[in-house]
Image (tube, rainbow, N blue to C red):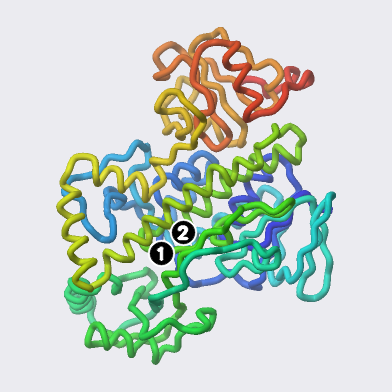
Amino acid sequence: MFDVIISGGGPTGMMLASELRLHNVDVLVLEKDAEPSLAVRSLGLHPRSIEVMDQRGLLERFLEQGKQYPGAAGRFAGIEPPRPIALNSAHDYILGIPQPVTDRLLAERAAELGTQIRRGAEVTAVEQDEDGVTVRLTDGELLRSHWLVACDGGRSLVRRLLQIGFPGEAAQTEWLLGEVEVTTPAEELTAVAEEVRKTHKGFGIGPAGGGLFRAVVPAAAVAEDRTVPPTLEEFTTQLRAYAGTDFGVHSPRSLTRFGDATRLAERYRLDRVFLAGDAAHIHPPLGGQGLNLGIQDAFNLGWKLAAEIKGWAPSGLLDSYFVERHPVAESVLTLTRAQSELISSEPGPQAVRRLLTDLMSVEGVSQFLAEKVTGIGIRYDFGEGPELLGRRLRDIPLGQGRLYELTRDGRGLLLDTTGELSMTGWTDRIHHLRLASGELDAPAILLRPDGHAAWIGEEQTDLIHHLPTWFGAPSSAASASPKANH
C-alpha cells in the first residue's frame, strides 16, 4: 500500500513526487512511456518556476544546462515592450532549457529522494473507496494507494475514467513542430524566417543546439488524431507553403503536432484523486506557460497532501489546492486565448495588436502583463492585510544566508525580527528564524512551505490565531523537535 501513486512521469509528476518525498511520503510514479520523450514541447522556465527550483536547491543544475535571457519576460504575443521590465524577483530572466532536459533533471531529483519510478506502466482503470484507491495497469496488475494524483497530460485517462468535466473549446488551429537538421546556411535561414514572421507570427525556425534546428509552422488542418505525429513530407510541405522553402530539413529527431484547444477541469479533486498539470488544464503554448503552470501546481499540492498523510493538515487544507490554483489556470487560459488572437494575420486581430502595442507604452501595462505571464504577480486570497499577504516572498539576503537557502526542506518558516514570538507546538512543521532589526520590511512574516506569506504581524496572540489555518493544531511533542530553530 503506497501513500501516493502518481500517474504520469512528466515535469508535474516528478516535481510533485519530490515535494512529497521531502516529507517522507511513500510515492510511486507510473509512466506509460518506456523511455523518456525527446520531443521539445517546452523551451524554458519562467521566473516563478526558477524561484521554485532555487527554493528546493535545484537551480544550479538547471543553470548549468540552460541559457539565461534577461528581459525576455516582458514580451506578450511577440510584442516587445517599449522599455525594460523589472520583475520583483532575484531571477528576472527566462531560462532557456529544452523540456527533455527539464524532465531528466526533475526525474533525477525525484529518484535521489527515494521515489519509486516505473516506466512502461500505464494506468487503465481506477476504483476508490473510503480507505484508498486501486489502479489497474495494462498487464492487469493491481496497485493500491491512499491517494492518486493524475499528472497524465491533457488527454488524461484518469480524468476521463472519473468523468470529471473538462469544458472549453476544441482546437481550431494546429501547428507542426520538428527538431531537424537543415542544409540552408544559417544567415539565409534567419533572413527568411524574419521575413515570414512579419506576417505569420505562428512560424519560426532557429538553432536548437547539437546541430539541430527547431521549426514550427501552421498545419494545413487540424488532425483528427493529434497523437499521430506528422510525416516529414507533411512538415516540409507546410514549410514551403509559408516560407517558400523547406530549408533542406532532414533527419528529424522528433516531429509532433499541437493545437490551440483550451479546456479547464471543473474540479481538481474527486475524493482521493487529484488532477495536476495538463490533466487539469490545456491551452495554446503561447507564452510558454504550460510546463511552468504544472510545476507550480505540484509545488502547491505537494506539502498539503503530505500534511494530510502525516496527520496534521487542518480542515480545508486539501481543498485550498483547487481554491488557489483553479483561478490561476483561468488567468493563464485568458492570456493564451488573447495571444492566440493577436498572432492571427486577419485584419481584426491585427488592429487589436496595433492597439495593444500602443497601450504597452502606458506606464504599468507591460509590467502587468509580464507579471501575469511569469506567475510573479500571483496573489492567493488570504483575506485583508498587507500587500505581501498571499504573495510569495522574493529571495532576500539574511544574516544566516539567503532566504531560499533556508527553505530547502519544504517546511514552513517564521521570519521574526521581534525576538518575542514563540512557535511552541509547531516546531515540527515550521522553522523559527530570529533576525536582526532591519533585515525584513515587517516585524514578522510566516511563510508556507511554498513560500507564500501566510501571516504578517508582530503579536503572539495574532500569530497563534493564524497558525492552525495552514499548519494544523499544535503538538505537545513538537516543541521537543531537534529541528525547532535554525
Mark 2 falls on what kind of element?
helix
Q: Is residue 100 above or below residue 75?
A: below
The spot of residue 446 in percent (x, y) is 54, 24
Question: Can residue 8 be seen by looking at this rendering?
Answer: yes
* Residue located beneath label 1 in the image: 285
Up the image or down, 202 lies above or below 471; here it is below
The tag earlier along the polypeptide, 2 or 1, is 1
Occupied quadrant, residue 343: bottom left
Quadrant position of the C terminus in the picture: top right
- State the SS at label 1: loop
Q: Distance from label 2 to label 1 (Cα)?
A: 7 Å
Residue 108 visible: no
Asked if marks 2 and 1 touch (Cβ < 8 Å), the reply is yes
Vertically, is 458 above or below 280?
above
* Coordinates of residue 162 in the picture (x, y in percent): 70, 63
The answer to whether residue 238 is above or below residue 364 is below
* Lateral position of residue 475 relative to residue 265, left or right: right
Q: What residue appears at the point 46 percent right and 29 percent down from the top-left corner? A: 402
Q: Residues within 10 Å of mark 1 (few under 14, many from 20)?
A: some
Classify residue 364 by image quadrant: top left
